[in-house]
Every structure is written in C-alpha cells, then in structure tokens.
C-alpha cells in the first residue's frame, strides 16, 4: 500500500513540476491609449469623470491634512 501511495505522489510531483517553455503573452487590459479613450463619447466621459473624482479625493485629503489633522495632534 505504501508503494502505491509513494508512486502516486512521485508521479503527481513530477507532473506538477513540469513547465511549458512558451507562455501566453497578453497585453494589460487596463492600459489604453488616447485614440481609444477619445474614440467615442462614453469612454471620453469616463476618463473625465475619473480625473474629476481623483482630483476631488485629493482635495478632501488635503483639507483633512491641513485643517483637521493638526487640531487632533
């Protein structure tokens, strides 16, 4: 019984440690160029909305850091 278990583990280990030399190269879906962004109004609006949200978030954090945080320390 031990021989069967060890043989199975050995072959499973050999199978799991083999690797392919060729890998699938896929571009990142999160990287877009300006031609794609401004190709239609929906993606252009999404890019502008994302920039506005990011700017508001930094503005809120700056106000917190400058106005509220010094009073807490």
Image: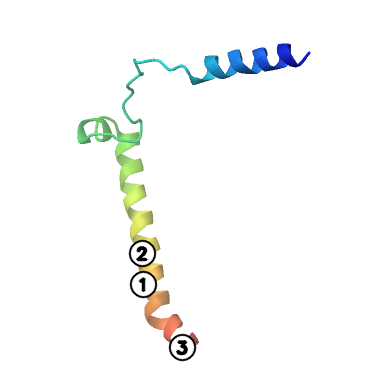
Furthest residue to the left? Answer: 35
Mark 1: few, some, or many residues within 10 Å (few <14, many ≥20)?
few
Q: What residue is disc 1 on?
A: 62
Residue drawn 33% across the image and 31% down it: 28
Q: Is residue 52 above or below residue 60?
A: above
Residue 3 at x, y = what percent? 72, 13
- The answer to whether the residues at label 1 and label 2 have Cβ atoms under 8 Å apart is yes
Mark 2: few, some, or many residues within 10 Å (few <14, many ≥20)?
few
Q: Which mark is residue 28?
A: none
Residue drawn 23% across the image and 34% down it: 33
- The answer to whether the residues at label 2 and label 3 have Cβ atoms under 8 Å apart is no
Residue 15 at x, y = what percent? 54, 14
Structural distance between the alpha carbons of marks 2 and 3: 20 Å
- The answer to whether the residues at label 1 and label 3 have Cβ atoms under 8 Å apart is no
Ranked by sequence position, the earlier of labels 2 and 3 is 2
Q: What residue is disc 3 on?
A: 71
Q: Could you say which quadrant of the image residue 4 lies in?
A: top right
Q: What residue is disc 2 on?
A: 58
Residue 65 at x, y = what percent? 39, 76
* Element type where label 1 sits in the image: helix
Ranked by sequence position, the earlier of labels 1 and 3 is 1
Residue drawn 36% across the image and 72% down it: 62
Residue placed most toward the observer, 60 or 13: 13
């Amino acid at each position: 019984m031990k021989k069967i278990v060890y043989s199975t583990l050995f072959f499973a280990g050999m199978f799991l440690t083999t690797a392919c030399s060729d890998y699938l190269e896929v571009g990142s879906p999160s990287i877009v160029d300006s031609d794609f962004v401004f190709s239609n109004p929906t993606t252009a609006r999404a890019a502008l909305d994302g920039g506005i949200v990011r700017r508001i978030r930094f503005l809120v954090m700056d106000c917190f850091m400058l106005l509220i945080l010094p009073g807490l320390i």
